[in-house]
Image: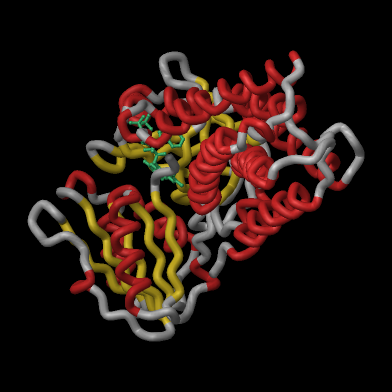
Amino acid sequence: MKTYKGILFIVITLVASTLLWAFATPIETIHPIDMLSHIVGGLAITGFFLVFLLATRSKILERWFHGLEHVYTYHKFLAILSLGFVILHSQLQDMIPHGEKALDTPLSDLAKELGELAQYGFIGLIVIALFAKFLKYEHWRFIHRLLLIPYALGLYHAYFSSKYDLFQATPLGIFTVITAIVGTMSALYMLTMYQDMRFKHRGTVTGIRKVGPNAVELAITLNQKLSYREGQYIFLKIFQTGLEKAPHPFSISGGDGKTIFVTIKALGDFTTKVNTDIQLDTQVAIEGPYGHLNFDKGHQQQIWVAGGVGITPFYSYLQSRPINQDVELFYSFRGQNDALYKDFLQNYADNNKHFKVHFIDTTTMDRLDSLHFTVPVQSSIFLCGPAKMVKHLTKHFKSLSNEVDINFESFKFK
Ligand SMILES: Cc1cc2nc3c(=O)[nH]c(=O)nc-3n(C[C@H](O)[C@H](O)[C@H](O)COP(=O)(O)OP(=O)(O)OC[C@H]3O[C@@H](n4cnc5c(N)ncnc54)[C@H](O)[C@@H]3O)c2cc1C
């Protein structure tokens, strides 16, 4: 379980929140249902603190969760869980017997109304975010950023309508203030500072090569050497009039750190424009590297599975050295136009006895499934490509044996 540090961090934080609320002393005697409702409400604001923290693309969290992809999976899971806590908190409030409810002050009245508004805000924004596939990535990202508003309202609600004095320097007060500040700062950081602070590597497009009818390879010469491992990816911003400025993730498909290559397949608006319009000498900025595909750490026997442009991390590794591991690569693509670096791969296989390649053209052959693979017991599997393919095959490999070491990168985050 490679993500255990990350999971442990989430569990410890949520357990700490539960215990601190459960053992704190309220300002006045409260009904047990009210007490439970406070614990659940506390879990909601702690959950959202984690949601915002996990969105910061922090290197430490990426390590703890073994890749940004896992970080985003837990980010999504926590958002849904926290929304559940918000709804449960409100239901429990409604269940408190009337005579047991404390009298409202104007301040707590307002805080309650804002709490209700926060609840609707969370429900609306999270439900919209879950329909990601119907939204353009930029719109989806914008909606995500708006979550800060219900979070701020929720914090106001907690501070001003709770039956616990969160302004006191009690363990609960300290925990709440720290998580509230870190949660808010994380959201503000992604909103205002991330784009400027994290894109430290600047560079210029110094080479453009068409590597297929729908794919272009860019050579980027950097002002400062980028230290990376073959198999990793970066976030790339391209500053050319007419191209979207937002960063997009691309695997490094080759290079030496001073010059790096990325191979971009035309998929949507941005990538299609890059394929048709990109010009030499265009300025770019880079953030990263990220990613946990580490072929050197795998077993001697390795199975590689690539789908479409997902060949890039493997191509990067193969170019960098003659491999010593025994590798069998299954490269799946839709039609010859989508097959990248095929000659290179065939040539590599012809000249290296450790490397075998199988080309699977899904327009004429069956899609990759369990029948294609014979997996030796002590082996490592590396997968990269479209999320659907990676998910499907990973499930299959996991069902084979617990001893198989599975590593994957899927080309989708939301
Ligand atoms: C870890 C990783 C590595 C990748 N490596 C490569 C590569 O080497 N070569 C390659 O051609 N493609 C790669 N991709 C996919 C590439 O990032 C998307 O194809 C590209 O961002 C699509 O942008 P678009 O506007 O053209 O398409 P759209 O139609 O707008 O988006 C298509 C899908 O791409 C994703 N996407 C869009 N914009 C972004 C963004 N700003 N940040 C993150 N995801 C986004 C979303 O899942 C979206 O649904 C990689 C993706 C990931 C997650």
Model colouring: secondary structure
Residue 274, by quadrant, is top left
Quadrant containing the N terminus is bottom right
Residue situated furthest left in the rendering: 364
Write the residue at 47% across / 44% down: 261
Give the x, y percent position of residue 394: 35, 64
Residue 388 pos. (x, y %) = 30, 51
Residue at x 35%, y 84% (from the top left corner): 376
Residue that appears at 48% across and 24% down: 143
| 198 sits to left or right of 368 | right
Residue 286 visible, this orientation:
no
Residue nearer the viewer, 64 or 245: 64
Q: Is residue 251 visible?
A: yes
What percent of the width, then of the height, locates residue 386?
A: 32, 49
Q: Which picture quadrant has residue 208?
A: top left
- 341 horizontally vs 403: left or right: left
Residue at 27% in and 65% down: 330
Ligand 1 is in which quadrant of the figure?
A: top left
Residue 99 higher or lower than 302, as above or below: above
Seen as rendered, the residue at the extreme front is 99
Q: Position of residue 80 (x, y in %)?
A: 49, 42
**Quadrant placement of the C terminus:** top left
On screen, residue 76 versus residue 187, left or right, reads left
Front residue of 211 and 43: 43
Judged left or right of residue 151, residue 207 is: left
Q: Nearer the viewer, residue 341 or 303?
A: 303
